[in-house]
Image: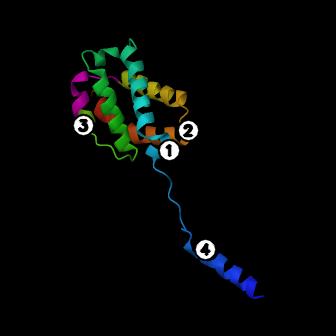
Amino acid sequence: MKARWLWLSLLLCITACKTTHTQDASLYSRIGGKEVLYKISAQTLDIVATNPATKRSFDGIKMPALKQSLADFLCVKTGGDCVYEGETMKNSHADLHITTAEFELMVQALRDTLDANHIGTREKNELLKILAPMKRDVVAK
């Protein structure tokens, strides 16, 4: 009988020490961290920089720097510990006169890249939800 109470007490102590709530990992972690965000950024930019319908926005742009800047931006937006030192979306796109059609092609390129890299539906939707409000800062009025 004592042994039974001892085991029950031990089980109760272990259960009491267990954290009662678990917090979801950040979107940054669930996507795969810096490496995956850089890969997604680079692949997406490669698509839109070579697409005849969107490539004009990338003329004269230093693509390696832009890829890193976009990766840092996504890192920050998804909860990573990166530092984004680039311009605001509004300032960086002001002189580009990006159309709604061009913006939608960029979003589609991002979706395709996320799918190609096996990013889950939940993570893809969360990322797109974070980025969607930026349309007003990117598309020319």
Label 4 sits on residue: 14
Helix, strand or loop under label 1: helix
Label 2 to label 1: alpha-carbon separation: 9 Å
Label 1 to label 4: alpha-carbon separation: 29 Å
Looking at the image, is mark 1 or mark 3 earlier in the sequence?
1
Label 3 to label 2: alpha-carbon separation: 28 Å
The answer to whether 131 appears left or right of 138 in the picture is right
Label 1 sits on residue: 30
Looking at the image, is mark 4 or mark 3 earlier in the sequence?
4
Label 2 sits on residue: 120
In this rendering, which labeled residue sits more in front, label 1 or label 4?
4
Residue 118 picture location, percent across and down = 55, 32
Looking at the image, is mark 1 or mark 4 earlier in the sequence?
4
Dot 2 amino acid type = Gly
Residue 103 picture location, percent across and down = 37, 26
| Residue closest to the eye, 98 or 62 | 62
Q: What is the span of residues highlighted in magenta in the rendered image?
A: 91-99
